[in-house]
Image (cartoon, rainbow, N blue to C red):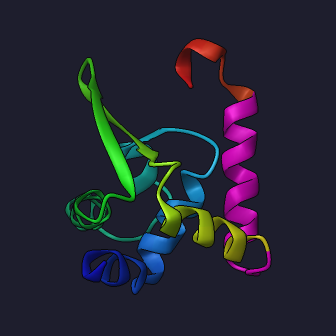
Amino acid sequence: MQRVFEALSSTIRRQILAYLAHADLTAGEIAARFEISKSAVSQHLSVLENAGLVTSEKRGQYVHYSLVPDHLANTLNAYAQEVCPVSKPLKAESAALKTARTPSEN
């Protein structure tokens, strides 16, 4: 549980979770949404993965990240994001990405 709280203590990590709310994203796609280095984004993704909040899957040359839907912290975080003025637009972007992609890319 300590790892979960540490993971959720970062605004950037909470934003990453919002971006992953509806769509799987590659590390590069996630990094493009932030003004920090790709290595910093990788470190944030590692913290989220170590906490069990996201999972990664290598597909070809890219690593795709997705939420672990059955994790209680993700369920609670999703609820909080519905009323959070920062996260709500990020979740909307995630939903738009999912809609724009073909079923084989999700």
Give the position of the N terminus as an image quadrant.
bottom left
Foreground of the two, 9 or 68: 68
The number of discs equals 0
Q: Position of residue 31 (x, y in %)?
A: 39, 55
Foreground of the two, 45 or 29: 45
The residue at the point 73 percent across, 80 percent down is 84
Quarter holding residue 102: top right
Foreground of the two, 48 or 95: 48
Query: Which range of residues does the magenta coloring cover?
Result: 83-99
| Residue 26 left/right relative to 88 | left
Foreground of the two, 14 or 101: 14
The residue at the point 66 percent across, 48 percent down is 94
Quarter holding residue 19: bottom right
Compared with 4, 57 (above or below) is above
| Residue 69 left/right relative to 53 | right
Q: Position of residue 55 (x, y in %)?
A: 34, 45
Q: Is residue 96 magenta?
A: yes
- Classified by dominant secondary structure, the portion drawn in magenta counts as helix
